[in-house]
Image (cartoon, rainbow, N blue to C red):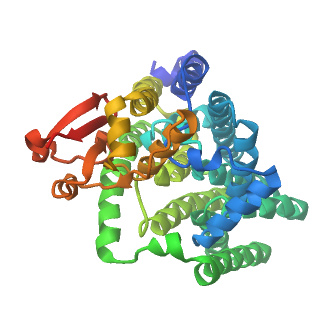
């Protein structure tokens, strides 16, 4: 008697599938526990520029939106989110971190629900969570309060849920389009566009996938119509941004090969190999132990084809849009969601026919990977928070530093971009100082021949520089895992 003739085989597979909840929940609960019991305060991205703005919520929104527009950014959704929630949590940064956890989990639930509605497999939700939470860069969404990506992920997921309800009956039952769902779908899509510009890729991919689905099957011309309208609208929106909005900060969008090739290498090593590689290997093993069964319903096959084309195209389009800018850190957060969604849709059906021991082993290994990724991110950010607060206290209370900076005119430089401004502002705002601007200087060599530079604030995470070049002229005055403050001795 083979294993599959065993009457308990189905129950064993069901039990193995439950294991996927472990890698889905453990990292989330660990982060929430840290928020509840740890000490969390404003970070060094853009928090300090959002907190304490004068005026009402609407006035804050207008100023922030105007500032971003002046820099060539069109982010009304992000502007209102910051104006509203930084006002609500102005004196409670720890509560804001808990709220951000809720936002991220809601975004995950939306995309997990979307995968479930597509596959009709209950395993899809924990499987999606497990894949998404294996992506190390995704954890930036939990710890950087001022980043825009999770808003775009949330609203694009909301839009796709509405579009799915509008289109699915026509795909699977040859029924009519549910046109009333298009209105909230388009509204959510616009909110995603207004969160951050690269999310225009979601609309383009949606239109493109519908057009390709129609070309393949030559049925339902209304799909072609919806696809053309969605594609044209999204491309038009992107052209509007490029023609009438882009300037200043956004003009740094570089189409040079050197910039793009460097970002491709960054994506290849950190994202494709560093995060996706594990799941590519898992997929190969599951495929080797699964039995393929083609869906006999033609409409269902067309529906899956559309979803897979969308998943692949939205990943590629989003990546292409960020390659001329940055393909690392929080910028690639949405790629983890798009990858997890597409792979979940592909794998959910295969798990039913895979060997039970293989499914269970994959879930257990996934738990280990997610505990490592989540633990590494949590340790780094918790340590970073603690070290930063200690450094701020040191900068505000060290008598020698105060004298040389305030009275002797000593220059302070920092190798971290956003933190170079945020550190100075936080010390002044929350520790009663009035220090002049700290200067962003990423390369150690640039400070050696400047006698006016007396202090150098150095963060290992912001650049692997050879500190031996400092020689005996520079002495560490404050040392932590995340920060070192050097002082020129002569």
Identify which residue, 385 or 181, lies in the foreground. Answer: 385
Q: 131 and 428: which one is in front?
A: 428
Q: How many marks?
A: 0
Picture quadrant where residue 474 is located = top left
Horizontal arrangement in the rendering, residue 182 relative to residue 392 (left or right): right
Identified at 61% across, 68% down, the residue is 73
> Is 177 left, or right, of 477 in this rendering?
right
Residue at 53% from the left image edge and 21% from the top image edge: 30
Q: Position of residue 101 (x, y in %)?
A: 63, 33
Give the residue furthest to the right: 180
Q: Nearer the viewer, residue 47 or 132?
A: 47
- Residue at left offset 54%, top offset 35%: 432
Quadrant occupied by the C terminus: top left
| Residue 459, horizontal then vertical, whole percent | 32, 41
Residue 444 appearing in the image: yes
Q: Position of residue 112 (x, y in %)?
A: 65, 40
């Amino acid at each position: 008697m083979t294993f599959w003739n065993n009457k308990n085989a189905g129950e064993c597979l069901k039990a193995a599938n439950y294991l996927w909840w472990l890698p889905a929940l453990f990292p989330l609960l660990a982060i929430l526990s840290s928020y509840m019991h740890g000490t969390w305060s404003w970070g060094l991205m853009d928090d300090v520029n959002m907190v304490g703005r004068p005026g009402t919520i609407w006035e804050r929104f207008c100023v922030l939106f105007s500032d971003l527009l002046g820099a060539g950014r069109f982010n009304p959704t992000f502007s209102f989110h910051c104006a509203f929630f930084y006002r609500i949590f102005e004196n409670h940064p720890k509560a804001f971190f808990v709220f951000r956890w809720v936002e991220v989990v809601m975004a995950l639930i939306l995309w997990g629900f979307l995968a479930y509605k597509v596959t009709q497999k209950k395993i899809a939700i924990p499987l999606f969570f497990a894949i998404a939470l294996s992506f190390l860069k995704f954890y930036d969404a939990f710890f950087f309060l001022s980043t825009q990506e999770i808003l775009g992920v949330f609203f694009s997921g909301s839009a796709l849920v509405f579009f799915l309800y509008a289109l699915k009956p026509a795909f699977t039952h040859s029924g009519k389009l549910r046109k009333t769902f298009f209105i909230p779908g388009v509204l959510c899509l616009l909110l995603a566009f207004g969160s951050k510009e690269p999310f225009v890729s979601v609309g383009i991919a949606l239109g493109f996938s519908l057009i390709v689905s129609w070309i393949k099957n030559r049925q339902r011309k209304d799909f072609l119509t919806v696809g053309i309208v969605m594609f044209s609208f999204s491309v038009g929106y992107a052209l509007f941004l490029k023609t009438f909005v882009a300037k200043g900060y956004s003009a740094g969008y570089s189409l040079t090969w050197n910039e793009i090739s460097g970002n491709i290498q960054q994506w290849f090593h950190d994202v494709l190999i560093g995060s996706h590689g594990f799941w590519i290997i898992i997929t190969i093993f599951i495929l080797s132990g699964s039995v393929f069964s083609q869906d006999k319903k033609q409409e269902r096959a067309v529906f899956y084809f559309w979803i897979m084309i969308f998943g692949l195209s939205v990943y590629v389009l989003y990546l292409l849009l960020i390659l001329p800018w940055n393909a690392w850190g929080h910028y690639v957060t949405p790629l983890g969601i798009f990858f997890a969604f597409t792979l979940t849709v592909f794998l959910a059906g295969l798990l039913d026919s895979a060997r039970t021991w293989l499914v269970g082993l994959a879930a257990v290994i996934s738990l280990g990977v997610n505990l490592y990724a989540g633990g590494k991110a949590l340790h780094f950010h918790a340590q970073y928070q603690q070290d930063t607060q200690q450094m701020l206290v040191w900068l505000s209370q060290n008598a020698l530093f105060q004298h040389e900076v305030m009275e002797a005119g000593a220059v302070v430089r920092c190798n971290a971009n956003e933190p170079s401004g945020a550190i100075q502002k936080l010390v002044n705002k929350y520790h009663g100082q009035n220090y002049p601007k700290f200067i962003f200087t990423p390369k150690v060599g640039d400070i050696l021949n400047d006698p006016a530079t007396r202090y150098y604030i150095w963060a290992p995470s912001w650049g692997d520089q050879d500190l031996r070049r400092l020689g005996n002229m520079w002495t560490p005055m404050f040392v932590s895992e995340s920060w070192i403050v050097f002082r020129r001795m002569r």
